[in-house]
Structure formats: C-alpha cells, structure tokens
Amino acid sequence: MVKEQVIAGMNYDDLASINTFARDWCAHKIAHVVCSTTGQKPIDVFNNEERSELNQLPSGVFDMPIWTEGKVHNDHHFVVGGNFYSVPTRHIGATVQIRMGLKTVQAYVNHVLIKTHVRKEGKGQWATDQNDYPDSAQYYLKNTAGVCIETAQQIGLATEEMIKKVLVDGTKTSLRKAQSILRLAEHYGNSRLEEACLRAIAFDNYSHKSLKKILVEGLDQKDTKTFSTRQAANTEDFAFLRAASDYTSTMEEHYE
C-alpha cells in the first residue's frame, strides 16, 4: 500500500519532500480508513489500545553500533577501527566482544562489560587507562619525562644533566632508561647517584649499565689517577690554572 500510494507514480523534489508527504499520509489519510481485518480505524486502535503500552523514547542520540571481536595483546590493548583501546591485565590474551558506537567503544567478555572508552577518531590513536596496568607498572607510567627531570633536579646538577641528556631523543626507550637511572637512588641513595653521574659525565658516558657498574664497584667513592669525585672549592685545586693577572698587558714588562 505504501508503494502504491506514496511512491508509485509520484514525483518529489528531494528526500525531505518525500518524508513530509509520507508523514501527512500516515497521520491524516490512511490512519482514518477502516481496516478490513479489524473493522476499525488504525488511529482509533492506536489511541485506545496501543498508546498506553509504548515506552518512552530514549533521551540520547540513537546509536546503531558495530559489533566485532578482537584479541587483547600483551600491551593491554585491543584494536578496532584502526585505534587501540586498553583493558585490565587479567584479560591479556583473551578474545573480547567489541561494541563500537558513535561516541564510545565497549569491550565485553562472556557478555559482561569490562571496559568503556571514548571512541577515538582517525587512525593510530591510543585510548589508555593507566589503572588497567598492575602496580608494578605504575611507576613507569606516572614518571613522565617532566617528572624525571624534576626528580633529577632534586638530587643534583650532575644527575639533572645525565637525565636531560638521556631524554634528548624523546623516545619511550630513553624514558625507560631515565627511569631506571633514577631508581638507582632507591638502593644507593641520592648522594652516591649524584657522584656516579658526575664521574660518568666526565667520561662522556651516559650508559645505564656503566653508571650502575660505577655504583656497584664503589668507583663513585674513590679517587683515581684520571678522575676525582671531589669537587674543587677554589681554583688553587687545579694544578695548571694561572691567575688572571698573568694574562694582562703587564706581562710585557717581563719581556722588556
């Protein structure tokens, strides 16, 4: 009937015109025609029997989601729509059911909701909840490059220089290296780490392995023929330095 009375033989300017005509046809024409099967007008059946049984329309925007499945990888994330979404550690290796809606992405295991993220736009975006990681990983997540530099500044100038040098390329690997260097203070103390950094920098060595070796072997507490961790208090401690007056114009007097 719809095809016959609304579509067949009709000409419309656009989709909006079709919708306007269809709504008017439903509400004011066909709704008032007695139906041969019920003997009643559809509008009367609706008002007297059906209206009271209807549920309220949802207040939000209608969402028609896409359902799919994905595996949770070792980095705590599953991939959907070209983006990465995290779930708690216990679900690593599991296959999750994924609901990708207009605004959210939800993960289910055995029909139980385990995670909801705001949907990312584009490709290659990461939605990571740090609370999904175990306590053992929280240190590395919370100690960003900025936090590492602030911590190093509290230890000393040499440690600050060491950490800034390590972080210069801005990679995750360099961040992990900086975090590992600072964690040495938990075992050896701030003072020894500062002295070890001072020694390592003198040899232009920014390796975590070498820095740890200095601490393990106690080299930060020893003076050697090539290096002393004792910081000079004045210029007299340097054997080859001369007074500034030695380089003034009065030097000419000695050659006259």
Image (cartoon, rainbow, N blue to C red):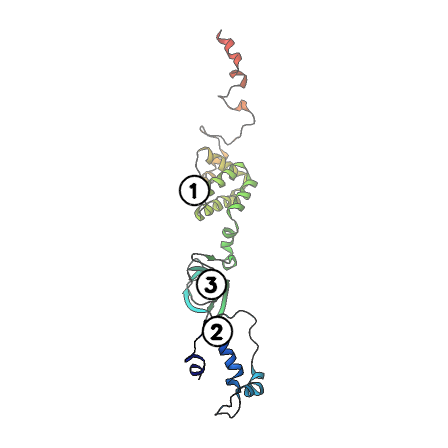
Of 28 and 126, nearer the camera is 28
Q: Which residue is mark 3?
A: 90
Q: Amino acid at mark 1?
A: Lys
At x 52% / y 13%, what residue is drawn?
A: 249
At x 49% / y 51%, what residue is drawn?
A: 140
Evaluate if marks 2 and 1 touch, with contact meaning CB atoms under 8 Å apart.
no
Q: Amino acid at mark 3?
A: Arg
Frontmost of labels 2 and 1 is: 2
Q: Which residue is mark 1?
A: 209
Residue 122 pos. (x, y %): 44, 58
Of 216 and 7, nearer the camera is 7
Q: Is residue 233 above or below residue 130?
A: above
Q: Tell me the element at label 1.
A: helix
Residue 49's label in the rendered image is: none
Frontmost of labels 2 and 3 is: 2
Distance (Cα) linking label 1 and label 3? 33 Å
Q: How many marks?
A: 3
Residue 110 pos. (x, y %): 45, 71
Looking at the image, the residue that sits furthest to the top is 256
Q: Earlier in the sequence, mark 1 or mark 3?
A: 3
Residue 75 pos. (x, y %): 43, 57
Q: Which residue is mark 2?
A: 17
At x 53% / y 24%, what residue is drawn?
A: 237
